[in-house]
Image: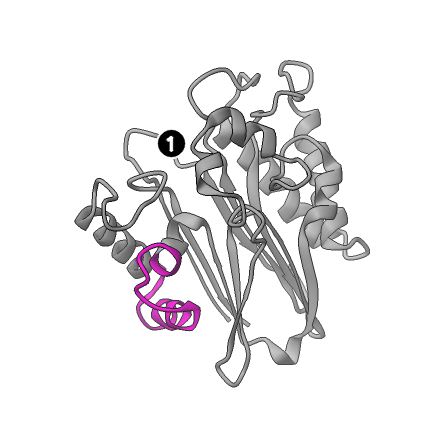
Amino acid sequence: MRIELNTAPGVASRPNEDWTSVALPAGGDGGTLVVLDGVTPPAGDDGCVHGVPWFTARLGGALVELSGSRRDLSLAEILSLSIRRAAAAHQGTCELSHVRTPQATVVLARWDADVVEHLVLSDSTLLMESPDGAVRAVLDDRLARVPRALLRSVASADALRNAENGFFTAAADPAVAERAVTGRTPASEVRALLALTDGAARWVEVFREGGWADCLALVRKNGAQELIDRVRAAESADPEGRVFRRGKTSDDATVAYVEL
């Protein structure tokens, strides 16, 4: 089995709000993969004294532990319980009802000898490669369907966050797990997994350097850091976003690759 994880902050002066881990059981087959992209709040109060990196570390830790130890629970149930745990860790000090309380996108995958389970919430990406080389992208495209003009307004974006006809992220409400994109695939039909935060997926979605299959092939051949390096090069070539419009000049980027 090959496992490769890389992550880089979008700006050196700011903490990286992404989080990733791959865990394998002490004995037997299987494993779990987690990638989180912390949502950077706009300037102003978010009701929390801890910050986004604190939140993603706690949510990610709970996801890893529960997906490995509670095989009796679905991934949606694991996400729900993990959100509950993360919320409990700061409900006594923070205003969890605040619309911008720390939150994150989620990619969660779990596998054993028989099946590969997946869950995606918001705009991070999971790629699944079959033995014949075909690549399937698992996406939650609700954020992509929101008009860009609405997202440029803080008030409009807040109104759409974790709301009907808007988009959903893992914040403080465990019920959001029901909104995630989930599925199960026979293990014999999956050769590799590649999880990307949107900062890394820019290579495909923003800069159009290749398709999803090209992206996975690049990581397999040259490694996860190569994908991040190519994204950074594309960002540097268009620093003001005149050719490739984007919300941030450079974003946190995380790549997690597993060959099963």
- The residue at 64%/16% (across/down) is 95
Residue occupying the point 50% across, 29% down: 52
**Residue 61 x %, y %:** 60, 41
Task: Specify the segment rendered in magenta.
Answer: 203-225
> Magenta region's main secondary structure?
helix
Give the percent coordinates (x, y) of residue 157. 52, 31
Which image quarter: residue 240? top left
Number of numbered discs visible in the structure rendering: 1
Residue at (44%, 49%) from the top-left corner? 198
153 in relation to 118, above or below: above
Q: Residue at x 41, y 55 (%)?
A: 201
- Callout 1 environment at 10 Å: few (<14), some (14 to 19), or many (20+)? few
Residue kind at label 1, given as amino acid type: Pro
Say whether residue 103 is left or right of residue 163.
left
Q: Is residue 166 above or below residue 98?
A: below
On the picture, is 151 further left or further right than 99? left
Where, quadrant-wise, is the C terminus in this rendering? bottom right
Q: Nearer the viewer, residue 39 or 186?
A: 39
Query: Toward the viewer: 92 or 167?
Result: 167
Q: Which residue is mark 1?
A: 15
212 falls in the magenta region: yes
Snapshot colouring: one colour
Left or right of 147? Residue 72 is right
Residue situated furthest bottom in the rendering: 132
On screen, residue 126 versus residue 77, left or right, reads left
The residue lying toward the viewer, choosing from 22 and 129, is 129
